[in-house]
Image (tube, helix red, strand yellow):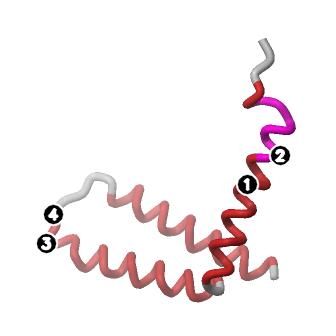
């Protein structure tokens, strides 16, 4: 059985599609603006934690936030 999802063309086209989405995202604002906005969003989330109560996924959310910030920092360096 030939699974097209595992073919090299499929991986290449997936990478190209992701690249196009990232390009569109970065064309909206500079990476530094995205980083500032992410900090604003995360700060608001952390401030509201007292009102929202315990969230067992708080550590996972921080890791996601951190990875997004690192992603935008890498895109800044790549320019």
**What is the quadrant of the C terminus in the image?**
bottom right
Label 2 element class: helix
Label 4 element class: loop
Q: Which numbered disc flags the more N-terminal residue, 1 or 2?
A: 2
Q: CA distance from mark 1 to mark 3?
A: 40 Å
Q: Are marks 4 and 1 in contact (CB under 8 Å)?
A: no
Q: Which numbered disc flags the more N-terminal residue, 4 or 1?
A: 1
- Residue carrying label 1: 17
Q: Position of residue 31 (x, y in %)?
A: 64, 82
In the picture, the disc for residue 53 is 4
Where is 21 relative to 42, above or below? above
Q: CA distance from mark 4 to mark 1?
A: 38 Å
Task: Please name which of the two marks, 1 or 3, marks the residue nearer to the observer.
Answer: 1
For residue 10, what is the image quadrant?
top right
**In front here: 42 or 18?**
18
- Residue carrying label 2: 12
Q: Position of residue 47 (x, y in %)?
A: 25, 79
Task: Please name which of the two marks, 3 or 2, marks the residue nearer to the observer.
Answer: 2
Task: Please name which of the two marks, 4 or 1, marks the residue nearer to the observer.
Answer: 1
Residue placed furthest toward the top: 1
In the drawing, does residue 14 fall left or right of residue 70?
right
For residue 8, what is the image quadrant?
top right
- Residue carrying label 3: 51
Label 1 element class: helix
Q: Are marks 3 and 4 in contact (CB under 8 Å)?
A: yes
- Callout 4 environment at 10 Å: few (<14), some (14 to 19), or many (20+)? few
């Amino acid at each position: 059985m030939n699974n097209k999802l595992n073919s090299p063309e499929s991986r290449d086209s997936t990478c190209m599609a992701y690249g196009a989405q990232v390009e569109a995202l970065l064309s909206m604002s500079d990476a530094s603006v995205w980083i500032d906005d992410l900090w604003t969003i995360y700060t608001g989330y952390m401030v509201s934690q007292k009102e929202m109560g315990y969230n067992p996924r708080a550590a996972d959310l921080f890791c996601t936030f951190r990875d997004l910030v690192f992603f935008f920092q890498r895109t800044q360096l790549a320019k």
